[in-house]
Amino acid sequence: MDPGYVLIDEHGSVEEMIRLISKRATISEPLNVLNLDDIVAKHRHWQRKLPTVAPFYAVKCNSHPAILRLLVALGCGFDCASKAELETVIGLGATTDRIVYANPNKSIGSILYAKQAAVKRMTFDGSDELDKIAKHFPEAELILRIRYDARVAQLSLGRKFGCDSNRDAKPLLEHAKSLGLHVIGVSFHVGSGSMDAECFYGGIRKAIEVFDMGRSMGVEMHLLDIGGGYPGANMEHFDLCTHHINNALEEFVHPRQGTKVTVIAEPGRYYVESAVTALVNVVAKSYEKDHTGAIYRIRYYVDDGLYDTFDWCDAHTNTPVVQEDKRDSACVRSVIYGRTMCEHDVIREEIFLPEHEIGDCLIFPNKGAYGKLLGRGHNGFSPTGVKVCLTRATLNYMCAVAVKAARG
């Protein structure tokens, strides 16, 4: 087994290992603990809640090789947005029929690579993209991305991607048809970090309207991609999303006559957010005092930050777990600064915590999504290390799949 992996036996747990690491006597390096069994549990939960929707993991969310290898073994598909992501998942054993190139605005070089690798399915949302594909990869299987935004989301991707379905869908389908291109489906993305569960119902309804429009023009489509936006650490909200998705599928998709519609989705955060726990160390502290000399805020400086583990767009969730030996202590107004000299490297601006000392370890759960992708190397700091944990059952499953793949 890879030396970066830790096998958890039947008498132990990832939680106990995290507790022991956090109590070490001397300051060590920051660490991410990646629990692969958490991803397996998420996959099984997805299959129970959305049995007719195939997950295509959004590689951009967290591309750690251990995660991608596990998802290949579990039979997931992959949502790739660049040539580099395509190369990565193909190199780890993903078959091209389980990949969608879900970037509506691709470089010519990446289109040519997709053609070479036989990755046919790709998205578009404009006529110039169709012209480019017609010239360089006319055999591609195209998915029209429409805009459908959640009412509340951390990032509204519709500002950048997706055509107006009422105004632009018909002209784009006509243009694709005139170029002899094959449009196979429709996609939408409600936004990253959506808190609007009901929006999936409306997005599916709108997509099926485009299906019907295409049918009236002689463009028969068979793939519906309902995108991402699923929570990874709030299963109650996820289950509410699945309720609205399943209702929409039952009402608009399953009763359709003619060509059977395959439904896929692009979960990212859902699979990995709760799989990673970040352990960071207090390396310095100082006090802010009022005019009487009374302490009104404590500044903590830790050895990780927004240029590595922590997500720039999600700072309000950066809340450490208060460990047992401090739970009875009074809480003090605090701020937690990251390790770089950047003034924006603030892990949590305002939070009330028991007082910590230099050398104490802070434990942050749910840090598996997006953070490590948004910046590395500021001030020359090395990337935070990752310790990958799994049980014997998960290891045996991955090994069996690897042996089967090697035998062809």
Image (cartoon, grey):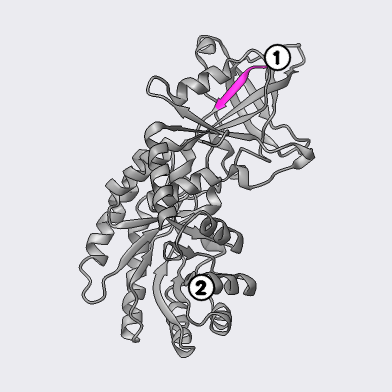
Answer with mark 2 or mark 1, whichever residue precedes in sequence: 2
In this rendering, the label closer to the viewer, 2 or 1: 2
Mark identifier at residue 316? none
Whether residue 234 can be seen here: no
Mark identifier at residue 295? 1
The C terminus sits in image quarter: bottom left
In the rendered view, tell whether residue 312 sits above or below residue 358: below
Asked if disc 2 and disc 1 are in contact, CB closer than 8 Å, the reply is: no
Residues rendered magenta in the picture? 358-363
Q: Quadrant of residue 249?
A: bottom left
Q: Position of residue 250 (x, y in %)?
A: 22, 60
| Amino acid on which the number 2 mark rests in the picture | Phe
Provide the residue designation for mark 2: 124
Q: Position of residue 393 (x, y in %)?
A: 37, 35
Residue neighbourhood size for the residue with mark 1, other residues' Cα within 10 Å, grouped as few (<14), some (14–19), many (≥20): some
In the rendered view, tell whether residue 399 sits above or below residue 125: above
From the viewer's side, name the closer residue of 332 and 306: 306
Helix, strand or loop at mark 2: strand
Q: Residue at x 30, y 52 (%)?
A: 50
Residue neighbourhood size for the residue with mark 2, other residues' Cα within 10 Å, grouped as few (<14), some (14–19), many (≥20): many
- Look at the image and say whether residue 199 sits in the magenta stretch: no
